[in-house]
Image (tube, rainbow, N blue to C red):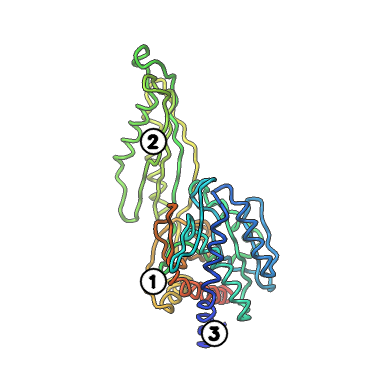
Amino acid sequence: MALSQGLLKNIREASASRLDEVCQLTVDICNVPAPTDAEQERAEFVAELLRQRGYEPEIDSVSNVYARRGNKGGPVLLLDAHLDTVFPAGTEINARREGDWLYGPGVGDNSLSLAAMLATFDILDALEIETDIDLVAAATVGEEGLGNLKGARAAVDRDEERGELAGHLVIDGHLGRVVHVAVGSNRWLVTVNGPGGHSFGAFGTPSAIHDMGRIIAAIADIKVPTNPKTTFNVGTVSGGTSVNTIAPSASALVDMRSTDPGELEKLSAKVRKIIESKPGKGLESVVEIVGERPAGGMPEDAPMALLAADAIRWVGLTPEYQASSTNMNIPVSRGVPTICIGISHGERTHTIHEQVPVAPIPAGLAQLVRLTVEAAELLGRE
């Protein structure tokens, strides 16, 4: 369906009129804890919100929540906002609105996106808009940290197995950005093991910590391209028993990223060669894969990307094309038309002092509603 000026005006007005409702919904969602791998409580909360709206949500085996809008059957456009936060269990939340700001750990990443996804269904229902293909709202788990995008994998698998997945719209990040390239990553837990011993009495026995240091130093010397952007990082190091013990074990978490699958593979091969060749006599190294996010992307002039850019211009902003690591990694790596957009501009993200300005939310919501309708039309034609 073509969106008339009258309908566009109605979408703007409906988005603006729901500002207070969306803010309260964001706060309510944020106040329900959802650490990665422990999202069940928030999943149940979102499912209840969908029931209150007249939908029949499903919760799958990994705790994703799904709700379908429309009864055409066949292809669907999946709207995806992740449930989990980076904060561990027991973190004090105290999400709230104070004047023109929303505060709370995870309030922007990703409670606002979940609220906007629900509000999109509310607006479509209120305006009696029937999209060209059915929509599926998916509140997904495992996007943050070492969650390894397990929720996005399950959601994509679910609709691919049914032969229904026509497109994927991820809600995450900042308003004005069109994320069309997925940054791939490999994350490894590297462990060096050895006999250990007394630092004086067994001097000369190889130390797992010393050899881990050699591994890290060699990784730091790897040359990587700037285009396509390719990076590496050793994020944590642990091991040892005491100051006067030759360490029997040492571990490190290694993160490797690239926008290009080939470059990511090359970097990973170099790192693995270092890990396997550096341990000295009497030591062994072990690699455990703890995260794999495939790279992929669409060109800036791909139809879904053009629609997203048009929706952003419509609300008075200039679109910025970006690469990022989000739930879109999974569908776009499989050739599914995918884009990722945001609703506002988060600040101090991934800290307990996270905050989000309220003023951009009506524009962000209007953009999302328009893009949802137009993307469904595009995918229906295809």
In terms of secondary structure, where does tag 1 sit?
loop
In terms of secondary structure, where does tag 2 sit?
helix
Q: Position of residue 254 (x, y in %)?
A: 41, 41
The one nearer the camera, 120 or 20, is: 20
Q: Amino acid at mark 1?
A: Pro
Q: Position of residue 335 (x, y in %)?
A: 52, 61
Say above or below: 209 vs 261. above
Q: Quadrant of residue 248?
A: top left
Q: Quadrant of residue 372?
A: bottom right
Q: Check disc 1: other Cα within 10 Å, few if <14, some if 14-19, many if 20+.
A: some
Mark closest to the chain's N terminus, 2 or 1: 2
Point out the frontmost of discs 3 and 1: 3
Taking the view exactly as shown, the residue that stands out farthest to the front is 98
Give me the C-alpha separation between circle 3 and circle 2. 59 Å
Mark closest to the chain's N terminus, 3 or 1: 3
The one nearer the camera, 262 or 88, is: 88
Quadrant location of the N terminus in the rendered image:
bottom right
**Residue identifier under label 3:** 7
Q: Amino acid at mark 3?
A: Leu
**Residue identifier under label 2:** 273
Q: Position of residue 194 (x, y in %)?
A: 43, 22
The one nearer the camera, 136 or 19, is: 19
Picture disc at residue 319: 1
**Residue appearing at x 38%, y 45% in the figure:** 266
Left or right of residue 342: residue 244: left
Say above or below: 161 vs 378. above
Point out the frontmost of discs 2 and 1: 1
Q: Check disc 3: other Cα within 10 Å, few if <14, some if 14-19, many if 20+.
A: some
Mark closest to the chain's N terminus, 3 or 2: 3
Left or right of residue 2: residue 100: left
Give me the C-alpha separation between circle 3 and circle 1. 23 Å
